Image (cartoon, coloured by chain):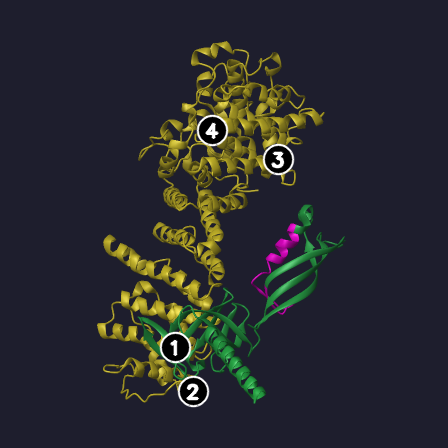
Chain colours: A green, B yellow
């Protein structure tokens, strides 16, 4: 899974004097207000934070603004799916025209039929739609499958991903992992054989 | 799969004449039309847009075509371009489910779900379109009741299912619903049918999984609308025409004593034949209150009343606590507390007490909170006496502490929070003294009260004379302490002092949980409501002659003031506030009906 990153940030958080009795709580509230929103400064969507106040000194802003600034060091977990990166999510809906996926439980992703590679064919199995690979019978995409998809674009406002299944390294994560392991084993066996010979 | 296959369909003069064509061919045709429109050839696209304007009463073939078209568009969402196909999108988002037959509704809902889930650009418009269907179009009101009910069920079940589906496919969709729900709520003077339908749907949404995200906003919107309607009803709509009646005759409790019937004289607006608007508003408010009560009951049955109560209290604190003229909307809190006295009931009192004791809060908020607390503790039949006594003890202790640190003389304005606390104590004791004194050691717990009342700040001189008189009468009869000569008042302008501490907002006369005058709402509350007529005071009626020394002098204002014309109504209302028209001795009978409804002033601003 790509698109996730950890950032160390030095932040100045401005707190209203009425919250001065519990500064840690106020900092938590300010940072929590940023969760699950795209933030240009962070260059990503804030998923989690771990903040620490390094200095007990706060800067009081002069003039009309009564807020005081607290310097905070924070570790931020950010989600920023760049185009062509690979992300993973659970399939929640399948129709002949599209596959709908939810990434990390909050970001909706859709792959329309023009972005599904020819290898996959839409079929009805047990009354439910699914995409089945023509070349690898075990490679099936159905509701509940964890799917690896390539990001084409990311709508920062509504956290919507337009995805693609055109590259070969996309599809059912379980199947892809299995395939990779088998390939690795095969290569390892070949390597050993060559060594013995 | 892959690129869109362009199938050459032999469409004749009418592009949508699709008889005999397969679904795939139709889908291809629609896709081709959409792609062609982007490339400049918009003939077929224009015909598609034209076909979107059909309604239920169109001929069967056209309606069937519309259904097929909508399904094809659902399958072609990937080909829709927000710029080149804006007319098509506009026509989709203008469509109303109410105009169509169920199978067209299904196709339209399917298309809207596909649009919402396929691109973030359409999400808000789709949600907006679905929420618009919460309000039926005017023609629906002309339908027969059974047909109307069927239609409502058909449309609204689909709207809710669609919202659920969208929130499943796009997990952040509910967070975008709140501003739409707020924006779409019917105006305050909208017809009752529209408002009720909308609020019904809001509460249904609050009960669903979407409610976990927007539930707090929904409760706030509903409470805000209740409050606004409440403020629309002036006291003129409530009070009796006969201004010669003394203010304690306006207690209205005989009729609201659990048996208020249709046409009873105290029903809001019923006295004022000219206030048809007031009637309509009060009926709407009554129905909305009842609907909200039902919702709270359903929350209790689902085991989530506690969670909803937290949101409810935040809404109450933000919207109602500081609204002076709130007369009915606060009963939502009362009802929620009565559903779960041990948890919500206790929590409400504690939260109000915390606000009163919080030095960070503005004085008016603190005074308002303690007025709510006093009224709530007095009226909540479901509250255990021991709990009322414990809250009272906190109030008494806090007031005693205040007295210890204060050396000032009587000064209503400077110590308004203190006086409001004292009045709250006296008011609660008027209702609860007898039962509290039955609790062992309660008398010693209330012992500091005597020192408060004899302090130089002299709360008995400042608090409402009617409350003070009733309190002293009961204190003497119950033996709470010896009513000494210090408590005999002569030549005091009590009402002026109480007005001074109550401030412009007249918080001294604010008893928010006086009997609810909305008929149906009251019938749901009455079993848990402590009416003054049911209160057992510490004295017997025959004891009246035992307390001749308690005299609360009449106000400087005379009866004539109340009989004056309306030219100076606000002034009169203020004057009518709380002071008995006659001395206590002469009016013991009236005072025995005491503090259930005290007419508030109409002059202050609606909120502060």
**Residue B40, numbered label:** 2
Front residue of this view, candidates B415 and B241: B415
Callout 2 secondary element:
loop
- Asked whether, in this view, residue A25 is left or right of residue B103, the answer is right
Query: Is residue A78 visible in the rendered structure shown here?
Result: yes
Tell me the quarter of the image containing the N terminus of chain B.
Answer: bottom left
Between discs 3 and 2, the one toward the N terminus:
2
Location of residue B250 (image quadrant)? top left
Q: Tell which tag, 3 or 2, sits nearer the viewer.
A: 3
Q: Residues within 10 Å of mark 3 (few under 14, many from 20)?
A: some
Identify the subunit bearing mark 3.
B
Q: Which residues are magenta?
A: A25-46
Query: Is residue B579 visible in the rendered structure shown here?
Result: no
Q: Which residue is mark 1?
A: A131
Callout 4 secondary element:
loop
Q: CA distance from mark 1 to mark 3?
A: 64 Å
On whether disc 1 and disc 3 are found on a single subunit, the reply is: no
- Asked whether, in this view, residue B577 is left or right of residue B202, the answer is right
Q: CA distance from mark 2 to mark 4?
A: 77 Å
Task: Tell me where residue B173 appears, x and y as whole percent.
Answer: 47, 63
**A27 inside magenta stretch:** yes
Q: Which residue is mark 4?
A: B384
Q: Tell which tag, 1 or 4, sits nearer the viewer.
A: 1
- Which residue sits at x=38%, y=63%? B162
């Amino acid at each position: 899974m790509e698109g996730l990153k950890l950032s160390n940030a030095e932040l100045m958080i401005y707190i209203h004097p009425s919250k001065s009795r519990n500064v840690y709580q106020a900092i938590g509230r300010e940072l929590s207000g940023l969760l699950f929103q795209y933030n240009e400064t962070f260059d990503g969507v804030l998923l989690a934070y771990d903040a620490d106040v390094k200095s007990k000194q706060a800067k009081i802003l002069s003039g009309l603004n009564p807020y005081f600034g607290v310097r905070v060091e924070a570790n931020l977990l950010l989600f920023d799916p760049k185009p062509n990166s690979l992300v993973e999510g659970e399939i929640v809906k399948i129709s002949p025209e599209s596959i709908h996926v939810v990434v990390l439980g909050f970001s909706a992703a859709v792959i329309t039929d023009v972005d599904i590679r020819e290898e996959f064919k839409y079929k009805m199995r047990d009354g439910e739609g699914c995409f089945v690979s023509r070349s690898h019978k075990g490679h099936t995409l159905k509701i509940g499958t964890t799917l690896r998809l390539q990001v084409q674009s990311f709508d920062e406002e509504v956290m919507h991903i337009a995805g693609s299944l055109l590259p070969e390294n996309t599809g059912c994560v379980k199947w892809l992992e299995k395939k990779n392991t088998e390939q690795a084993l095969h290569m390892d066996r070949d390597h050993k054989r060559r060594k013995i010979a | 799969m892959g690129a869109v296959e362009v199938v050459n369909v032999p469409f004749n003069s009418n592009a949508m004449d699709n008889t005999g064509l397969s679904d795939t061919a139709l889908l291809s045709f629609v896709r081709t039309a959409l792609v062609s429109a982007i490339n400049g050839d918009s003939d077929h696209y224009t015909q598609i847009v034209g076909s979107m304007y059909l309604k239920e009463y169109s001929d069967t073939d056209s309606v069937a075509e519309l259904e097929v078209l909508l399904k094809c568009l659902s399958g072609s969402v990937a080909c829709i371009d927000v710029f080149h196909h804006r007319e098509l999108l506009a026509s989709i988002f203008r469509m109303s489910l109410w105009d169509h037959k169920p199978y067209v509704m299904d196709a339209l809902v399917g298309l809207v779900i596909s649009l919402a889930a396929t691109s973030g650009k359409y999400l808000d418009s789709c949600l907006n379109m679905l929420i618009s269907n919460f309000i039926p179009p005017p023609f629906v009101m002309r339908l027969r009741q059974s047909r109307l009910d069927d239609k409502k069920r058909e449309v609204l079940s689909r709207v809710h299912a669609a919202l659920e589906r969208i929130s499943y496919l796009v997990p952040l969709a509910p967070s975008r619903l709140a501003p739409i729900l707020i924006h779409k709520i019917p105006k305050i003077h909208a017809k009752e049918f529209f408002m009720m339908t909308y609020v019904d749907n809001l509460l249904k949404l609050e009960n669903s999984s979407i409610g976990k995200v927007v539930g707090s906003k929904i409760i706030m919107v509903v409470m805000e609308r209740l409050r606004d309607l409440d403020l629309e009803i002036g006291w003129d709509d409530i009070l009796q025409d006969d201004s010669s009646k003394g203010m304690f005759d306006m207690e209205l409790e005989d009729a609201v004593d659990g048996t208020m019937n249709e046409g009873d004289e105290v029903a809001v607006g019923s006295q004022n034949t000219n206030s048809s608007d007031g009637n309509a508003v009060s009926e709407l408010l009554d129905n909305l209150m009842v609907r909200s009560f039902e919702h709270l009951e359903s929350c209790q049955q689902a085991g989530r009343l506690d969670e909803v109560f937290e949101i409810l209290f935040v809404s109450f604190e933000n919207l109602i606590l500081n609204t002076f003229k709130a007369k009915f909307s606060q009963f939502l809190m009362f009802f929620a507390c009565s559903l779960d006295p041990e948890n919500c009931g206790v929590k409400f009192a504690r939260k109000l007490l915390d606000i009163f004791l919080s030095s960070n809060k503005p004085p008016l908020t603190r005074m308002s909170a303690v007025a709510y607390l006093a009224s709530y503790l007095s009226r909540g039949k479901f509250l255990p006496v021991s709990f009322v006594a414990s809250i009272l003890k906190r109030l008494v202790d806090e007031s005693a502490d205040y007295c210890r640190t204060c050396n000032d003389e009587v000064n209503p304005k400077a110590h308004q929070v203190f006086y409001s606390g004292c009045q709250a104590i006296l008011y609660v004791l008027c209702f609860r003294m007898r039962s509290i004194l039955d609790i062992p050691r309660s008398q010693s717990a209330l012992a500091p009260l005597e020192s408060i009342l004899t302090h130089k700040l002299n709360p008995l001189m400042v608090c409402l004379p009617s409350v003070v008189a009733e309190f002293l009468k009961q204190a003497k009869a119950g033996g709470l302490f010896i009513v000494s000569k210090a408590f005999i008042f002569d030549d005091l302008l009590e009402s002026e002092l109480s007005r001074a501490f109550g401030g412009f907002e007249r918080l001294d006369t604010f008893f928010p949980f006086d009997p609810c005058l909305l008929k149906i709402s009251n019938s749901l509350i009455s079993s848990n409501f402590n009416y003054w007529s049911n209160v057992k005071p510490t004295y017997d009626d025959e004891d009246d002659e035992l307390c001749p020394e308690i005299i609360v002098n009449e106000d400087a204002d005379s009866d004539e003031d109340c009989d004056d014309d309306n030219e100076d109504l606000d002034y009169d209302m203020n004057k009518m506030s709380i002071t008995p028209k006659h001395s206590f001795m002469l009016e013991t009978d009236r005072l025995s009906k005491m503090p259930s409804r005290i007419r508030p002033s109409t002059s202050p601003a609606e909120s502060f």
